[in-house]
Amino acid sequence: MELVSLTEYLVKELLPDVENISVKEVESENETIIQVLVPNDCMSRVIGKGGYIINSLRTIVQASAYIRKLGRVRINVDSL
């Protein structure tokens, strides 16, 4: 749950409208999947040009999971 809070905090800092954001954790066999749902018009702010922002978010969350020994983490971003 710590990773969900971290991901939610980072995404909310990127977007102006934070009420329509949903961050959920889905457990899989080998990894944890964090599902981020944002409004369609805000997708470009989360993904960034060339995917640099989402890749940075993934790096931060994966590093946090590695430090806490929580296993593999994957972040999926979809629109509402």
Image: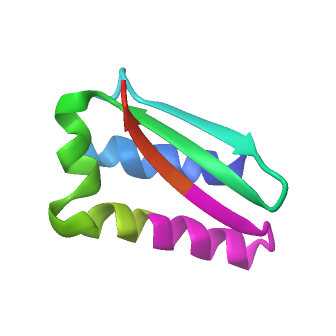
Residue drawn at the location 59% of the way across and 47% of the way down = 34
Task: State the residue at coordinates (26%, 65%).
Answer: 51
Residue at the image position 75 percent from the left and 60 percent from the top: 31
Above or below, 67 against 37 in this view is: below
Q: In the image, is 9 to the left or to the right of 28?
A: left
Figure check: 72 above or below 23:
below
- Outermost residue toward the front in this view: 29
Residue 8 on the magenta span: no
Task: From the top left corner, tell me how far across and down residue 55 is, in percent.
Answer: 38, 69
In which quarter of the view is residue 66 placed?
Answer: bottom right
- The x, y position of residue 28, in whole percent, is 78, 49
The quarter of the displayed image where residue 79 is located: top left
Q: Is residue 16 visible?
A: no
Residue that protrudes farthest toward the right in the picture: 29
Q: Is residue 23 above or below residue 6?
A: above
Q: Is residue 42 left or right of 62 when viewed as pictured?
A: left
Q: Say left or right for 72 vs 37.
A: right
At 63% from the left and 70% from the top, the residue drawn is: 64
* Residue 6 percent across, percent down from the top left: 55, 53
Q: Which residues are magenta?
A: 58-74
Front residue of this view, candidates 13 and 78: 78
**In which quadrant will I find the C terminus?**
top left
Q: Is residue 61 visible?
A: yes
